Image (tube, coloured by chain):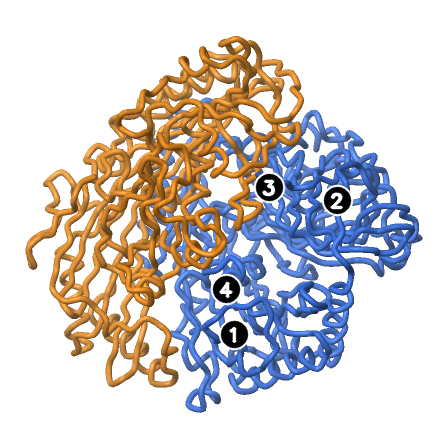
Chain colours: A orange, B blue
Amino acid sequence: MTEGRMAEVGEVLDATSPDDDHLVLRQEEGRALGGQVRQVLGVETFMMQVIHTVRRVTRIANGRVLMNVDGDAVDCYIEFTKDRYQGRCSLRYLPDLPTLRERLTMALHNATLSPWWRSDRLVTESFGPQSISTSDIWKPATAAALREGTARESALTPVFDVLDASTLIGAGFLSFVASARYVLHGGGLEAYGRETDSQLSVRAIARDGTSSGWAGRVARDWSTVVPAQVAREAVDVAERGAHPVALEPGRRTVILSATAFGQLLDTFPGAFDARNAESGIGVLSDGRKSRIGKRVMDARLRMWSDPNDPMGGNMPFFGDPRDGAQRDFIAGFPVTPVSLIEGGVLRNLVYGMGYGTSVGKPFNRWPFALHVAPMPDVATQTLDEMIAHCPEGIYVNRFGSLLVTDAMRGQVTGVTRDGCFYIKDGKIVKPIKNLRFLTSPMFVLNQLLAIGVPMRVQGADSLWPETSFPVIAPPVMVSDFNFIALCDAV
Amino acid sequence: MSPLRPTRREFLAATVAPFGARSFLPSSQSLPITPRNRAARATTYLPDGTAVHTLRQLALAAVDAAKSAGATYADVRLMTMRDSFVSLGFVGDRPTLFSNTSSDFAPAFFPPRATFDVGVRAMVGGATSFAYSERPTIDAVTEAAKHATASARGLAGHLRMPLEMVHAPVATGEWETPIRIDPFGVPLEEQVDLLASYDNVVRRIKNGSVSLVGTGFVWYHKIVVVATTEGTLVTQGWRYGGLFQRVQGRQGVSIVELDGGDDRLPIRAGGYELMLDPAGHDRIMRRTEEAVRLASYPPSVLDVGRYELVTGGGATGHFLGSLVGAALESDRALGYEAGVGSGSYLGPPSAVLGQQLFSPTLQLSSSRLPSAPNGAQWDYEGVESTCTPLIERGRIIDYVTTRATASALRSWYERSNMPVQSNGNAGIATAINVPLPSHGHLIMAPDAGGPATIDALCAGVSHGVLLYDPGPMSVDAQLSSAFMLPSALMFEIRRGAIVGRLMQNGLQLRSRNMWGRSLKQIGGARTIGYTFADAAKSQLDSFSVEAPAAHFVDVDVTRTGVE
């Protein structure tokens, strides 16, 4: 793990390069707006947060561009304390000075009518002078793809070409996102960061509707994605999956692609919530207290979250729309790397602000980017090696329709999709129809037979790609995976 | 937040997502109502919304900008939304499963907000592109229009197949939900007093209580302007709201929770007059008594196997919406949603239309008419709303379509002597979404001579399951099967009578079987229930469903084990 950099107060936190061309909010703009807020309010007990997001999302199917969405959104949020009243103000654009004055005056008027709950967060807790730098999650190639627009056409042409060369029909999803976030506390804390992200997925479907294949890449840096390769992988899986046969459900050895394993893990981070675990709730609790310090999963595994993770990462300070419960963090507060599992042993939990304060723990809330990997001394296997070592089992390319069925036990159900194959004597021998499963990620994490090299994986395709956090996961081989029913869906 | 205690935010997300309420939720936090603000109204807190004539000017400016930039077709949607939410909510520190003291609840309200969104769809050379903004200025909307047109032009040379927008008559005019009392002008004090009277009804019932999500009123006023380069310009205003309340019944450790509000839909079109129904208190009392009665059944477990299943109207509607209604969205059936992993077992249309795939007793239609719960004069493409028959005697005869999908059904429409046009079912959650085919209100016809009560349907069951209130379902990507969790409110039936409550059994459903050979009997009009079904697309709101109770045979009942 790496340490985030603390900048000097007043320093430009994340200098934009000349070719960035003002794609998203600059630090100077955020700082200028903050100065106006300070001037209008005339107090130092305030917090301001501005999030600016630019996105381009394209969906294709059957040779058509079905949807191409270009969005540019600003979310500006200010809360303050003045004359014993607490006010809040939310705008969907960067206001000019008269608008800002009007909205803050209205917010103060509303505040005088009804004070906030005492239990609510108080802005007077705002932090003193410190500046927080961005982590390395802004990639010029992705920013250029957003700015120029032609990257979209350049990406789609090879995808169409590969699909045209096959006998399959295809659909795809392409997105580029750039976002900037600026936070200023009246007390002096200032944070600014930018991030880019991109993803491309292709789903190829047999014309008779009996098989499908999927491949996807998600990357901070668009230049690392080769669209034709993604399309070829999807076509390959779909072609190999033609004419699947039904296999009886039951407990079976499975080889999960990194994507499939990552999808399962994506249901898991809530288990690390300290309030639940220490109250005896969830799979990282023994029913009375948390299992901290105990081995909870395969000793070959480790898990951590690090804003500066080169494979994913996240903004190094709180204030993210993905946080959801706004009462549980203070925007701009630094996010530090946290080791969650080491050698299968639970090392840390995550604390929200309210609960962390009440039990005297530094609050770090959820891990953002979740990185799951084998311990450094563990030998990894490639997917081909796992298949070669599997006497009988099933390869799962991806899951769909995931639903947590029991939050207390971490039980999850879902359906295999877009590539499911029967393995016999170390070889894939035939495609099989999809199966529904019912299991717990905790069970899977304790039944590992082999672990591969982690990669960043893609969860659900979303029109709002920035709403999911990076998950980095390896492919794995697992014993006794619980399939409960056949599924007709392709 | 403990999984045992849903927040009001979570409750609202689940119950008021229909009608476009999503934009209300993200940054709202409740304020207490104190002597200082009891006389205030929602309008006291609201920033001025964008005036309707300004919305029209903005829409026309965007259309002109797209046309000037070279769009062969463009349409614009502008939406403003105001909301107000008043509640008696739980204020204690310790989440518990059961509370029945009024001191645990206090009046509060969410500060009302007004939002603005605009989306522009432009077409050049068979390619469409969409851009949006959340700023109500001429500069912002014209910039979005130019951007969408430029993007469409860029994509036009890279298509293998152009997209066709079918013809639609030019529409102009205005429409608004009729209301008698504007809830935004009703003092908070008056609303709190009425809510307190609802709560008191519940607390008077022995072993009855109000759930910790509290009791509240939620009100919305949405205005949408749609304009196209063809000359359509329509302005519509939706007024809707209602009571949200979950009532609980307890017997020992057994707790049953039910919607306490309206027998129809908790949120529906209208104004504050909806809440002045004199029968409202009686209804809440009956629901609470029902919850107490249902909580009295002892726990029971069924072995894995196939059983008969009786569903109340709401539960029938839940399955119908998720497994049949959504599958009849034309974009799913045509494979347009495959890129984001959604499809339909009722596709491709060429293989499905005209086929009898379901029980001949199944009659299904979808309505966006003004008389429907969330209906209007026109859809979000400016096409006149209709009531579209979808299934007749088990035979699929149509899908819900938009101008962008209807052309793919051309051969069927021509063969059936039907016009090749959208049936007026373009939907959006907010204006920053591209219009997609969606149901307004899905209607399953009752059996005119069918049983008049659920008890009458249960009477014919020797050993089976009564599904009273469905739980969450994992539905596969083609909607061909579903797994319903044991958290549903289900009961074991033996010889026509309820004998126990099932808490460890789930249901494994296959869509075609369920609505085909498994559907044994449909209830009469008096068994009709109402619910919302998840559209399963982030760009769309949930849609409402009305359906009668039903009796199914050979339904797979599962048991969830613990690893």
Question: Which residue type carries mark 4?
Answer: Thr
Q: Which mark is residue B204?
A: none
Residue underneath mark 2: B389
Indicate which label's residue lies in the foreground, 1 or 2: 1
Question: How far across and how far down the image is residue A338, in percent?
Answer: 27, 46
- Pointer 1 and pointer 2 on the same chain: yes
Question: Which residue type carries mark 1?
Answer: Phe
Which quadrant of the rendered structure holds the N terminus of chain A? top left
Q: Secondary structure at mark 2?
A: strand
For mark 1, name the chain: B
Residue underneath mark 3: B562
Residue underneath mark 1: B90
The numbered mark, 1 or 3, whose residue comes first in the sequence reads 1
Question: How far across and how far down the image is residue B346, in percent?
Answer: 68, 32
The numbered mark, 2 or 4, whose residue comes first in the sequence reads 4
For marks 2 and 4, give the CA distance: 39 Å
Residue underneath mark 4: B7
For mark 4, name the chain: B
Question: How far across and how far down the image is residue B483, in percent?
Answer: 65, 40
